[in-house]
Amino acid sequence: MIEGHCLCGAVRLEVTDHDPRIGACHCRMCQRWSGGLFLCFDAKAGGVQVEGPVVRYKSSEFAERGFCGICGSHLWMRDTTAGDAAYNLMPGLFDEAADWPLRSEIYTDRAYAALRLEGDHRRATRDEYEAKNAHVTGDLP
């Protein structure tokens, strides 16, 4: 079990079922939301407990994003088309995530020059990723 919290501490998360590897996304929506690079790790919905003033924003036809209603810290992105959707949680909320390896990187052809990631991990361009994920429709707003 790991515990995390937002910047101000008003939102607290407890996670009991997660993949301790980080994924990176360079799509335009994630760039706008994160300021450049979206990092996350997967946690099963049943293994995530959240307390505090969470605000949810439906950012596309398939996803919602959660953030703290007080300090604005980004908490998660979730695919809302799945019944019991996993959370894509922000690793910065959890001290334990500091040593986790990079699992994958998508929209690599959209990465800012300053944010190209090195290492041996799976990579996919926009076309490659969207070919395997039909519910995603291009660089969303």
Image (spheres, grey):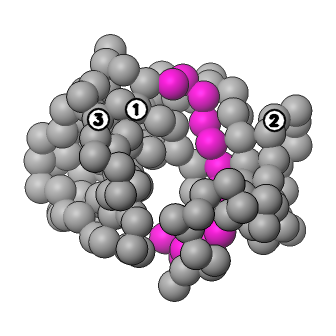
The disc label shown at residue 45, or none: 3
Q: CA distance from mark 2 to mark 1?
A: 20 Å
Using residue 137 as the reference point, say whether residue 78 is left or right of it: left
Q: Give the residue type that dot 3 points to.
A: Ala
Residue 51 is covered by the magenta coloring: no
* Residue topped by disc 2: 121
Using residue 112 as the reference point, say whether residue 32 is left or right of it: left
Secondary structure type for disc 2: loop
Q: CA distance from mark 3 to mark 2?
A: 25 Å
Of 76 and 73, nearer the camera is 76
* Residue topped by disc 1: 43
Residue most extreme to the bottom = 141
Instruction: Give the residue drawn at x 33%, y 57%.
Output: 80
Callout in the foreground (3, 2):
3
Which residues, given as a range, are shown in magenta? 19-33
Instruction: Give the residue drawn at x 19%, y 64%.
Output: 55
Q: Give the residue type that dot 1 points to.
A: Ala
Q: Give the residue type that dot 2 points to.
A: His
Looking at the image, residue 105 lies above or below residue 137: above
The answer to the question of whether label 1 and label 3 lie on touching residues, with beta carbons closer than 8 A, is yes
Percent of width and height locating residue 102: 70, 34
Q: Examine the rendering and report whether any part of residue 109 can be seen.
A: yes
User: 10 Å neighbourhood of mark 3: few (<14), some, or many (≥20)?
Assistant: some
